[in-house]
Image (cartoon, helix red, strand yellow):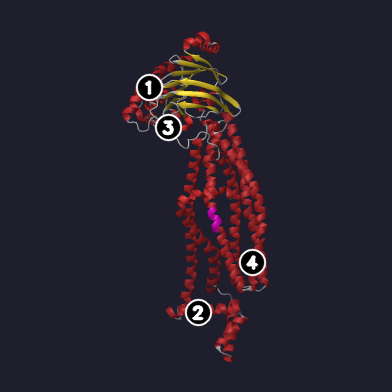
Amino acid sequence: MKRFYPYFGYLVQVKSTYLAGIAAGLVFAISSGFGMPLLVKTVFPVIFSSNAKVEEVEAVKEVRSVLVEQRSEEDADAMLEKAFPAEAQEQKATAEVRRWVADRVGPERAPKVLLIAACALIPLVALIRGLAGFLNTYFITAAGLHVLREIQQSVFVKLQKLPLGFFSGRKTGDLISRVITDSNLLQGVVTTISNDLIKQPLTLIAALCYLGVESWKSRESFFLLICLLSIPIAVLPVRKLGKRLMRKAAAMQREAGDNSAVLAETLGATREIRAFNLEDMMGRRFLDGIARWTKFHLKVVKYRYMSPPLIEFISAGVVAVGLGYAASRGFTLEQFLPLVLALYMCYDPMKKLGEIHNRLKQGEASLDRLEVILKAEEGVTDPADPVTLPPVTGRVNFRGVSFSYGDNPALNGITIDVPAGQIVALVGPSGAGKTTFASMIPRFYDPTVGSITLDGVDLKNLRLKDLRDHITIVPQEAVLFAGTIGENIRLGRMGASEEEVIAAARQAHAHDFIMNLPEGYDTQVGERGAQLSGGQKQRISIARAFLKDAPVLILDEATAALDSESESRIQEELADLAKGRTTFIVAHRFSTIRIADRILVFENGKIVGDGTFQELEASHDLFRNLLAKQRH
């Protein structure tokens, strides 16, 4: 349970709702553990009386009459209570109740009124117990939904802060499964189980109190308390099953994550799957994953639901022993029934506590998966005392910057000064370090060694939001979000007016095609812009960059995903966008770098060439080789 304690803090914000649920649970527990047996003991004898019971009562009455004739009434009652404590006390209590009722409704109507009142107590107690159970479930569920929202929000926010390296090699579907499925299981532990850990033990205590009172009044009833010593016997199999359940639950959650990943991969590549006839292969992968998940899920069901019947079997055995003992000691049904009900109320909470133990183990498996995210190092964080940027011109300096992806070096000792407003192209073979260099500027990664400054201020001294507000990125594949075209352009500057959005679209030469669409700027783009062509998506991405109007611009192979015709049309917009901004162009196609004032040639994480297009073409072998491959 200690591992779950930090997550109980989510209940503080809804403590009133949660405590209301707990209070209702306490009423339910007391009415179940103590109220139900007491109801059976007090009401049933009034409604039903066996011949044996009538004979006992009549015998006590005759003895009392004889004693009264010989002695006083006080002495007679004292002798009867000593000889027949239970019968005398019950007769005295019943007589007092009947006398109280007779005084108010008359002797003739008293038996009928007493019977009606006794019968009415049954639905009244049931109503109290049922209403308390409902309110307990409702309020605990309400608190649970709040906890679920807070857990999912915490995981989601943490995912936004994790370094890009965290996502390398991780399946998107598996991360989605952790956010949704594992959060649900953790929420169940925090609310439902914490509620049961209060309600069920209290029900057990209430039932034990009733048994204790009855045992104090009757020595024969003490034996039934001895029956509760079987509780430790039931704990042993529950603990063993819980350990197995945790292992199988962890495997089941892993398979659920893998299946979500296969599904996400399939839905994200529908064209490619059809083009290469991969439907059968992907179908087999998904069905195999479902089969493995089903296998582990059945194991979880087996170990989770095996403990209740074991405990029930032990309970039934104890009741059978108690029944035999009670019969041998001459217990009447009226005496035995409340005790058995109280004994059952002891074992029912114990069975629920066994289920709680198993759910805790399943919750631990989900917690392991969630804490991979929640306890991951964020890597790139805001400084404790951030510096406020003056108006940014866009001067960028690298000083002895080195960086590695784990054990794989990506940059090695980079030192470079880029004046404000200069257009710099980054070229080199694949894996030379171009994209990593550009990714250091918005602090997607921090240098392992060295520093990077913007207008002389170290990037690590700036708030991430302040830094990224001054940087615009146009990626290789334009990323659009579900919504309208206007909403996607406005992501560049959320407070922009409609006129500013249209002006940015005109600068990106996107206004004409947008207006030809049925709903213009209100046209839905679909998931990831599925309703638009590649060129249209890229123009919207460029319009977004125009609207943001940041002094630093990164074009990350912005035309690599386009055909030659679309590329040539968009080159003009990119040239307009780069004017007056410090621009870094990551390019494989050299057609995009002719607008550059300066070209940096990368090889093995180092800058091995620095100059204009003409200078490098005339003097740099690697640049000439790359250029020759482009021309062929």
User: Which label lies toward us, 3 or 1?
Assistant: 3
* SS type, badge 1: loop
How many residues crowd mark 2 within 10 Å: few (<14), some (14–19), many (20+)? Answer: few
Image-based side of 396 in relation to 335, left or right = left
| CA separation in Å, label 3 and label 1 | 25 Å
Labelled pair 1, 4 in contact (Cβ < 8 Å): no
Is residue 141 visible to the viewer in this orientation of the structure? yes
Question: For residue 225, which numbered disc appears in the image?
Answer: 4
Residue at image coords 55%, 79%: 91
Q: Which mark's residue is nearer the viewer, 1 or 4?
A: 1
Which picture quadrant has residue 104?
A: bottom left
Q: State yes or no: residue 585 in magenta.
A: no
Q: Which residues are magenta?
A: 194-199
Q: Front-most of 502 and 552?
A: 552
Residue at image mark 3 = 466
Q: Earlier in the sequence, mark 3 or mark 1?
A: 3
Q: Is the C-beta separation of discs 1 and 2 under 8 Å?
A: no
Which of discs 2 and 4 lies nearer the camera? The answer is 4
How far apart marks 2 and 4 lie (CA) works out to 31 Å
State the SS at label 2: helix
Residue closest to the eye, 473 or 550 = 550
Cα distance, mark 3 to mark 2? 83 Å
Tell me the crowding category of disc 4: few under 14, some 14 to 19, or many 20 or more residues within 10 angstroms, Cα based: some
